[in-house]
Amino acid sequence: MTDTTITFTDHLVPALESGDYTITVRQEVARGGTALETFAKTARFTVAGERFLLAPPVIREMFPPAGSVGDHSNVLPHITLTRPTLPWEREPLKDAAARSPWLALLLFADDEPVRTQVLPLGEIAKGPAYFPEVVLDRHESSGDSVTVIDVPAELLRTLLPSYADLRHLTHVRGGDGSETAVVTAGRLPAPGGSSSVHLVSLEHRFRDTPGGPAFDYGAHDEIRLVSLADWRFACVDEGQTLPAMTRALAHDAGTFRLPDCGEPLADAFLGQGFVPARHHLRDGGRSAAWYRGPLVPGPVDGGPVSPARSADGLLRFHPRAGMFDVGYAAAWQLGRLLMLRSGDSATALYEWKRRRAQKHKRAARERADYPLAVTEIDDSLPENVLAWLTALNRLEGVPFGYLVPDERLLPVEAIRFFGLDQQWMWHLIDGAYSVGRLSRGDAALDAASPLPLSHPPVTGALIRSEVVSGYPGLLIDGYGQDAEDPLGVVRCDRLAPDVLLCLFDGVLSRLDLHQRPESQHFAVEARDTGGYDKSLRATGDGTVPARPRVPVSPGPRRTLPVSDLVSAMAAAFGTDPADFTPADFALQMTETAERVTFLA
């Protein structure tokens, strides 16, 4: 695979800040230097950026993942925002000469007295906790709900980054063709406990003082902050980090089949990926049958199938077992039902088949020297039908129960490798294509007009793990026998919060799991003797030795001394601390992505 280049940028300032604007256009008409008339037009508009609430699509990722339980004691939590300008769309200090982020990420331990509540926007300045009066924008209402946290002033003085530190805890990260904003907390989680994280607004909460910009605590014992996003995680289990969790999957990695039961005849079916299933007969009777979906222990080739007019013709009886194999019949019936449920696609397919039948009849008349001219009929397959069938050919829309008919096929915290039964896929597509197949003549026309769909060998993997739900930015790379070039991705989707389906074009030999390079977190390294260090990335010009280390001494409540750390890094590189930018700091603090490999 090709390496992804990650860029770090200090900030990305929007062209216009959020707020209300007035624009006036004037035109003066003159003749011979004498003004005759002046025309003016004034308009008002609002740049309505986020202020008291973040829409879910704005949040791309939270780390550590919400609800996770892991060894996070040496990492700095962060939140990734899809709009890279968001942290600089407002100001913490009104009319400041230099722009700083108006967002900060605060980490709280469970035993710290922080109250969270939802209040109407018009009431957030009321109550014992201090919050300055709010001037609402035109699109805002005093009845809008807003989430706030009330924090003891003494605690907030310890946890809140300084005005200067805010710059170094926020940056823009680019990669894979997009840019995101990353806001990082300035505190390490305490081991052996739970923590909550809040993304808070600092809009106009700082004021000028003789010593520089400082947060306005006033003379209050409790401070109220607007919380734009929050999540919780626990720091207790060393085995719940991404590398540990993905490596644990290797203990339950295998092919997509049930274990043998000890009965040779049944084991022959189980080894091929079949599962026992209830079979409801058309006459109302019930029986047991074997079922196998499209996911099988190894790739299964299959050529084009003859158009079927009902699912019954696809039932296969095994005399020795005395049981039916209902897999292909179920695939055909499912395809038909999915197409009928599709609405517009089913209607378009039916109407197209009627046009095709009419054209076939007219062609027969022309061969019989029909004397009258006939209008040409467009019998090309509608694009929406082809798009729908193409998606179905990637198993899109297939219910989970048809893919995993028995929960034992995919246990919790397991990975299963499989091949795609192309014969099953042919019958699935034929079932969908059967809508409008009313007679033998229609079936003959379907056989003479095959769909432009290919069925090459496809293999893949199913993963059921907290890794899937906890790390939404997880990347999956598949490789064949040639370990240099990755296989093409047919589909990679979450079927459930903790279930990931990956399909690859070709025979899978190796599967790599890793985070997006631009999703890596800030972290420090624990010393065996206690305390922390941070290994720095060497410069490319050779002026700094490889992997220099600077000490990290957490302050009260495990807060990160950002200014001291910036100065130490700048000294290691022989740079003035004033010239050591947020992008430089992010480059040094970001951990390298780990990659875990599975052999299929």
Image (cartoon, helix red, strand yellow):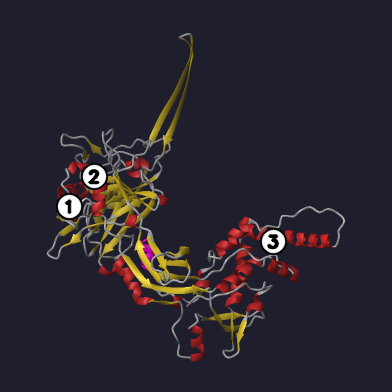
Q: Is residue 350 above or below residue 101?
A: below
Residue 97, picture quadrant: top left
Q: In the image, which disc is placed on residue 544?
A: 1
C-alpha separation, residue under disc 3 versus residue under disc 1: 71 Å
Work out whether residue 412 can be spotted.
no
Screen quadrant of the N terminus: bottom left
Q: Is residue 387 above or below residue 137?
A: below
Work out whether residue 356 can be spotted.
yes
User: What residue is pinned by disc 3?
Assistant: 350
Residues in magenta, as a range: 465-472
Name the residue furthest right: 371
Considering depth in this image, is 155 or 76 the residue closer to the camera?
76
The number of numbered badges drawn on the structure is 3
Q: In the image, which disc is placed on residue 581?
A: 2
Residue 340, picture quadrant: bottom right
Whether the residues at callouts 2 and 3 have beta carbons within 8 Å, the answer is no
Q: Secondary structure at mark 3?
A: helix
The dominant secondary structure in magenta is helix
Magenta stretch: includes residue 467:
yes
Magenta stretch: includes residue 359:
no
Q: Position of residue 310 (x, y in %)?
A: 67, 74
Identify the residue at horizontal 36%, vertical 61% (top origin).
471
